[in-house]
Every structure is written in structure tokens, then in C-alpha cells.
Image (cartoon, helix red, strand yellow):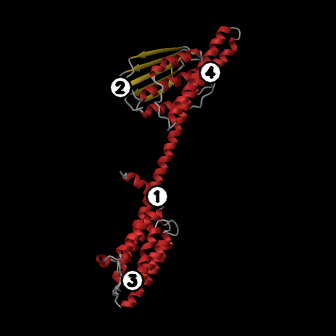
Amino acid sequence: MIDPQQVLDRWHQLDVTVRDLPLALALAGAAFVPQLLDYGTQIGDLPARPLDGWAVLVIALQCLPLAVRRRWPAVCIVLVSLGFAVGQVQGYHSFAANALGITLVSTGAYLAHRRRLVPAVLSVAYVAMAVALDRLTGAERVDEFVTFYLAMALAWGVGSWLRSTRAAEADRRLRVAEETRTAERTRIARELHDVVTHHVTAMVVQTEAARYLTGAPDRLDETLNAVTDTGRRAIGDLRHLLDLLDPGHDAAVRTPSLRELRTLVEQTRRAGQPVELTEEGTPSESAGSAELVAHRVVQEALTNALKHAHGSPTAVGVRYDDREITVEVSTAGTGPEQALVGARPRSPGGSGRGLVGLRERVDALGGEFGADRGADGGFVVRARIPTGSPA
């Protein structure tokens, strides 16, 4: 059984000249159908001549150039106009004369260069043809000539409108594609920041701590094992992220969720940060992307606590209900160098995009996000994230 869509796809793969050729042949063939002889275009009162060998040449000159109306529109309009003028002056009135209107529409739509010169030349040529017809017939039919000219100008205008519409659509698609690429780059940068920064920060902090444990082999070995485990988690998360970004990856991709909070907190504790986790309620099965965003909020807050307030007590509170997830992460004050603010960090510096990225994530789900100084001089991150948004 023939698939119409497959046939249509193969047709569109053909050269544009091949696709336009059937129209040219159909119009030329219609010119020899007796029932269509009276449906041609005639200007002036010259009597019609019977179809002879010269008429065949005039019909071919008017119709066959339509095969290149999109590839070479300037050539097409010159040949068709010449054939039309010869046909009108010699009295070869046929259905093929209608090709001029089709050609004007196509030229207005596809002509890329000399768009002002071509209509100007055609107008001058039309005036010359009108004068010749007037002298041959002796009848003053100025109104007929003007009406036909306006009709042909309308055909050119329709083609120009199609061209401008197509150009506007192409610009819109280009703009949408660029906005999509920008949004995708932003999303990738945000995901990389979330995945890499937390693990690398923990590894750097643990490695720095290991310098002071040379006299305690047991604690040194424990710290180095923690660094190794953190590196392995980083590799695993990066692999999952690459799977998420790979369009050819068919397997289900695991994304972080609030069910992994305990693992995240334990990893932060092993990096030397005292963290207390409090959970209220049960995560909803329909939380959607709210669960991922909440996980990222806790992850980023703990990362910044490690960087800017290493060793300061940190409290993580998460509350679940049917409509939203509420997250609060607070870090105790550490003196002049406060957690999560723009002060000079004690360990790896930040790019400043972490909290901005969190705010964008939460805002995208219609939630609320805030990051403020605490009463004790520390810093508090709060987020209210509505559930139910698709992942």
C-alpha cells in the first residue's frame, strides 16, 4: 500500500524546477483545449487568429518558462512577458495568456534582486505594447489598458506580500530558535553548576582538612575515603546529566529528588559541616518538578554553607503537603565572613549564579524564594514551591 505522506516527502525532495514543470506543461496543454479558447486574456480589439505553428511557439514561450519561475524568476518574467506581448500584437489569443498573472505573483514572491528595476522595465514595456495595440486597432481603450495594468500590479503585490510574510516567518523561527538555544545553554549551565559545584566544593574542603590529619592516620584515611566517595558521586551525577542532555538517550534518566536528602546531608557532614535535617509530612507522588527544585535549593544552600561558613551549624527544614513544598536552610553566623553573602569566602569562590539560578527555578513554578541574613548574623534561604508542575 502506497503511503501518501512518503510520496509527498519524496516529491518535496525533488528539484524545484522539476516540481514546477507540471504546472507549465498543464497550462500549455490547456491552451489547445477547444472549450478553453474563450477563457484567455485579451487586450484591445484585434481579431483572434487560428492556432498555427507560430501560435504553438507563442504558447510555449508563455507557459514553459513557468518551470523556472522559482529558480530564475527574472528569466521567467522576461520570457513570459515577451510571449504575452507577441501573442497580443499578433492576435494569438489563448488560455496560455493567463500565465502572465501566475508569473507576476511568482516573481513578486521569489525575485531577490532588482526588485524595483524589474517592475519599472515591465511597466515601460507594457506602455509600448498598449501604444502598439492602440495603433493597430484604432480604438481608444485607455480604461481597459489601465484596468489590466492595475490587475497585473495587484498580482505583483500579492507576490510581494507572500515574500514579506515568508521572510517574517523565517525571522520569527530564527528568533525562536535563538531564544531556545539561549534557554538551553542557561539550563545546561545551571545543571552543571548544581551538579559540579556541590561535589567539587565538598572534595576541596575535605582535601584541605586532610592536610591537618597527618598525625591521625585513622581520621586521614576516613577523610580520603570521603573524598573518593564524593568524586564517584560527582561522576555518577555528571553521567546522568549527560544522559539527560543527549537526545539519542532512550533510557529513563534519574533526576535528584527529596528522597535523596539524607544522602546529601550525610555527604555534607562528612565534609566537616554540622547539618541537622528536619522533615515534616510525606512527599507527594504528584510533586512533579517541584521535588527536583526543592532538592536543588537544599543542595545549593549546603554548598554555599561549605564554601562561606565551613564548620558553622546548619539546619535544613523541609515540609511537605498536598499543594507545596517548603524549604528553609539556615546557617549560624560566623562573624564578619557570613554564609552565602558576597563576603570573601574561606574556600573556593562562587560565581554568583547559584542563588540567581534558584530564584529562576522557583519562579518558573510560581513559587517564592528568598535569601536573607538571620537574626544571629548568619544566613537563611527560604523557598515555597507549588507541587503538581510537570517534570
Picture quarter with the C terminus: top left
Q: Position of residue 155 (x, y in %)?
A: 39, 70
Q: Which one is closest to the eye, mark 2 or mark 1?
A: 1
Sequence-first disc among 1 and 4: 1
CA gap, disc 3 to disc 2? 78 Å
CA gap, disc 4 to disc 3? 88 Å
In depth, the one of 180 and 372 nearer the eye is 180
Contact flag, marks 4 and 3 (Cβ < 8 Å): no
Sequence-first disc among 3 and 2: 3
Amino acid carrying mark 1 in the image = Ala
Q: Which residue position is annotated with label 2?
A: 323
Q: Residue furthest right?
A: 215
Q: Is residue 75 above or below residue 193?
A: below
Contact flag, marks 4 and 2 (Cβ < 8 Å): no
Q: Residue furthest front?
A: 1
Sequence-first disc among 4 and 2: 4
CA gap, disc 4 to disc 2? 36 Å
| SS category of the residue bearing label 3 | helix
Say which mark, if any, is on residue 203. Answer: 4
Amino acid carrying mark 3 in the image = Gln
CA gap, disc 3 to disc 1? 36 Å
Q: Which residue position is annotated with label 3?
A: 88
Amino acid carrying mark 4 in the image = Met
Contact flag, marks 3 and 1 (Cβ < 8 Å): no
Q: Residue furthest left?
A: 35
Mark 4, Cα crowd under 10 Å, few <14 / some 14-19 / many 20+, is: many
Q: Residue drawn at (43%, 34%), measured in percent from left and top?
A: 364
Sequence-first disc among 4 and 3: 3
Q: Which residue position is annotated with label 1?
A: 167
